[in-house]
Image (tube, helix red, strand yellow):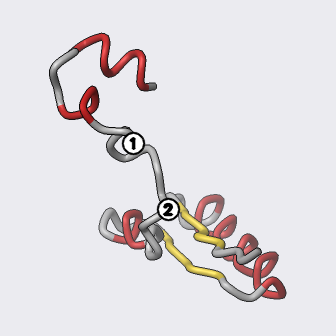
Amino acid sequence: MRRATVGLNRDGFAAKNKHQPITFLDSISNYQKAVEVADGYGEKVTDPGEVMPALERGLRAVTVEKRQAVINVICSA
């Protein structure tokens, strides 16, 4: 990604920054909101026991409702 971006504009924003725009999620905790604004299904999961049910809800949104889905799973080490 970086090589392609910098190759197109060697003096641009991407060339001057360590992280490429929109390619890292470390500071975004509510990434699921991005799909919600486009009428997709978004859900944030922090409990390991809720991952599978959330994936099932997301899959239903995609297969039955014909919407995009993002399941934002927040893990801690």
In the rendered view, tell whether residue 16 sits above or below residue 55: above
Question: Which residue is at 44% across, 44% downward?
Answer: 23
In the rendered view, tell whether residue 13 sits above or below residue 2: below
Dot 1 crowding, Cα within 10 Å, few <14, some 14–19, many 20+: few
Residue designated by label 1: 19
Residue designated by label 2: 26
Question: Which residue is at 45% across, 25% downward?
Answer: 1
Q: Secondary structure at mark 1?
A: loop
Q: Secondary structure at mark 2?
A: loop
Q: On the picture, is 77 further left or further right than 31?
A: right
In the rendered view, tell whether residue 7 sits above or below residue 13: above
Q: Position of residue 76 (x, y in %)?
A: 71, 77
Q: Earlier in the sequence, mark 1 or mark 2?
A: 1
Q: Position of residue 22 (x, y in %)?
A: 36, 47
Q: On the picture, is 46 further left or further right than 28?
A: right
- The quarter of the picture where residue 51 lies is bottom right
Q: Position of residue 52 (x, y in %)?
A: 81, 76
Please name whichever residue, 65 or 76, is drawn nearer the observer in this view of the structure: 76
Amino acid type, residue under disc 1 in the picture: His
Q: On the picture, is 12 further left or further right than 36?
A: left
Question: Which residue is at 22% across, 15% downward?
Answer: 10
In the rendered view, tell whether residue 30 sits above or below residue 20: below
Q: Position of residue 14 (x, y in %)?
A: 27, 32
- The quarter of the picture where residue 9 lies is top left
Q: Residue furthest left?
A: 11
Amino acid type, residue under disc 2 in the picture: Asp
Question: Could you tell me which quadrant the C terminus lies in?
Answer: bottom right
